[in-house]
Amino acid sequence: MFFMLNKEEKLRALLLDNRFVDWINNPDSPYAGFWLQWTGESAENAELADAAREFLMELRSAELAGETVTEETEVDRMWESIGGTIAERPTREGQPRRIIRKGYWMAAAAITGMLLFIGVTFFSESRHQLASVKKKTGQFSATGGISPEVVRYNGSEGGELVFLPDGSKVTLAKGTRISYNRLMNGKNREVTVSGEAFFDVVKNPVKPFYIYTRNMVVKVLGTSFRVTASGGKESVAVKTGKVSVFLKGQDLEQSGATILLPKQVCTYSKSTGSLVMDTAADRSKIEMEVIAKNGYDFEDAPIDTVFRTLEKMYAIPVHYERSAFFNSFITISLGSESLEEQLQVITRTIGATFSISNDGITIEPPK
């Protein structure tokens, strides 16, 4: 899939690939070997990596200087123009290479769904899980597209709403990171948390939802609750439904779980290495700030606008031939159903078909 993309699409895929971002930001990245091999395989790969690295360095400099992202409509316009921002300039050897003009880092920040490339290093538990994924699946292919794991980070002052592909929603407090399989297409739905987050999980009895902190595992079928895993504190507080809490390392099928009901809280005790129950769980700031917005509403909107919104919501690229859908418009609400259900509605409406993988979403026009 990757080799079939044009240069703009390949650059976008690199900027959306958490493996690449982690390598650029972290010298000890577990993906260093893969990317060094990939960049050495062709001049085009090296050129793309160089352009993407410069783009991220511009973003780093701007963030450190205290610059902020402009209004979303302006960011959209800038990303629309990114193809025209790649200019030619000679290297020391006199060969041209691709560069990104200063200022267009804001488009990358938006297209990743507020990933905030600055400081995006996988915290220890997430890095361990990603290493396990790599170990189980073998070395990543150089043409394998973007990583199956995605990291979402809230660098804003207030809460930030994140949409998961199964239809669940998570509100992240400032400084919170979560990581999960981009498509959640495994046996279970799994999320790793560092910070504080409020979950509203869609029910699916045949596919449990697991949340991992440093010392706890939370098993959910469908409910809303708060998870805190920061400042040396780990706790779970239930708002609706019920959850099962285990100590990390326990057999989730054989061990007796701590069951939490509404208005109950379970905290990990460092001193005893056990789970402690309480009943008067106070509402935290993030719970009171749970974002009321449940999605995006479009009325007779260009399909291009809808596809770009999906990219931001789920941090996954959408590949399609724009000229084939130039006169396509749609009225739809995004965010109330799973990603696959939304794609089914969209493609049925415009007479198209879709396929979805870790490389992204591919939309095929009517035949």
Image (cartoon, rainbow, N blue to C red):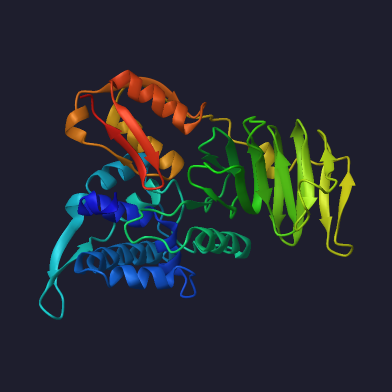
Where residue 182 appears, x then y in whole percent? 48, 46
- Residue located 28% across and 56% down the image: 11
Quadrant holding the C terminus: top left
In this view, the residue in front, 18 or 65, is 18
**Residue 285 falls in image quadrant:** top right
Vertical comparison of 163 with 127: above or below: above
- Residue located 28% across and 73% down the image: 40
Vertical comparison of 303 with 257: above or below: above
Where residue 287 appears, x then y in whole percent? 69, 39
In this view, the residue in front, 319 or 188, is 188
In this view, the residue in front, 197 or 29, is 29
Instruction: Tell me how many marks there are.
Output: 0
Where residue 305 appears, x then y in whole percent? 31, 32
Is residue 296 visible to the viewer in this orientation of the structure? no
**Residue 237 falls in image quadrant:** top right
- Residue located 33% across and 64% down the image: 58
Is residue 129 visible to the viewer in this orientation of the structure? yes
Vertical comparison of 334 with 88: above or below: above
Left or right: 188 as drawn, with respect to 119: right
In this view, the residue in front, 225 or 253, is 253
**Residue 93 falls in image quadrant:** bottom left
Instruction: Return the residue found at the far left.
Output: 94
Left or right: 208 as drawn, with respect to 324: right
Where residue 126 appears, x then y in whole percent? 59, 59
